Amino acid sequence: MGALTGPHLIALDGGNSKTDVLLVTHDGTVVARTRSGPFAPHIIGAEAAVARLAPAVREVLASAGLSRVELLAGYLANADLPEEESAIGAAIRAHGWADRVVIENDALAMLRAGTDAVPAVAVVCGGGINCVGVASDGRRVRYPAIGRISGDWGGGFGLGKEVLWHTSRHEDGRGPATLLTVLVAQHFGTPDAVSVATGMHVGLIDRDRMHEIVPLIFTAADQGDAIGTRLIRRQADEIALLAVTTLERIDALDEPVDVVLGGGVLTTRHPLLLKPVLSGITEVAPFARISILDDAPILGSALLGLDRLDESIRPGTGTAARRNRLRLTLEDSEVRV
């Protein structure tokens, strides 16, 4: 492909399992797309996490004959605190990929992918759990979302740890029996469930596989397992609580408002999870318009980046053509890993 002219954007959506990288033109056309591994600055540091992204970013630039773009917009998991966003932004600027760099949490990208409306709320329950709300006046509500120490419960990683807690206690006699004990051992090919916990502790089993335990919870609950059912119900309560609390904080409990749900745990659409989530929200916020995000969150990263690239376009207005073009060209683009 020859060198391109005009404004260009690199959009990043970084998660706990993968990072999507797009090169997008100002009209919303995806020029190049690739994928990198997990984005984990909280574990390896901002500079090292960005260094792992570097080959993917260089690939999309080179594919269009570019060495630099006008804007890089990164909406990233584990960019939960202002100081984390600042450190990641500094690490990206050091590579010289863009004239401007915007770094924010990936929950904002999910919200933007799911709706153009304001006010609105998004709850993501994937590897972790998080929520963001935008009020009518533009005010944002966010949460630290750094795990149990900041009041969070659940998400794929948290649910996996809860399962291993219960299965270990079942096996050593400290807790009640659960079908999850057998399911976990079978899934990982170990003689018992505690071997999964110890295997992750010593590095024989990759801790990134913790999310593989989540489908086993639904399997157990479908067969009437009390522990599996209890974990799903608690996760539903936590999701609904985040949504309702955020709606209250943006003063939108009693008005029509979009609530976007996303992340791997929620997109299972399992009725044991989804029904109590929906009822938990609508009982308190009866006018909430609840949707589950089917678009990839990278769509939101690109839309937010385009909003920043052309500040004359007010976010949420005049973007239908861009959104449609992004969707179409995303579907047509090939993901290279």
Image: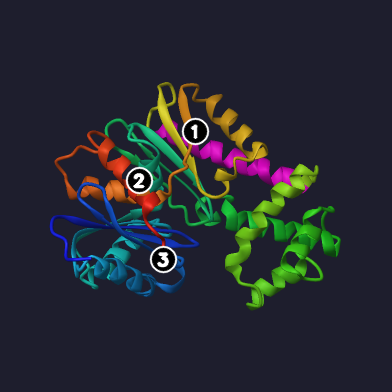
Q: Is 326 drawn above or below residue 65 in the view shown? A: above
Q: Is residue 29 magenta?
A: no
3 or 1: mark nearer the eye = 3
Give me the residue at 81% from left, 59% from top. Answer: 182
Amino acid type, callout 1 = Val
Q: Is residue 228 magenta?
A: yes
Segment colored magenta = 227-249
Secondary structure category for the residue under label 3: loop
Q: Residues within 10 Å of mark 3 (few under 14, many from 20)?
A: few
Q: Residues within 10 Å of mark 2 (few under 14, many from 20)?
A: some
The residue pinned by badge 1 equals 244
Q: Earlier in the sequence, mark 2 or mark 1?
A: 1
Q: Earlier in the sequence, mark 3 or mark 2?
A: 2
Residue 78 or 289: which is nearer the viewer? 289
> x and y percent of residue 298 in the render?
38, 52
Q: Earlier in the sequence, mark 3 or mark 1?
A: 1
Horizontal side, residue 238 vs residue 170: left or right: left
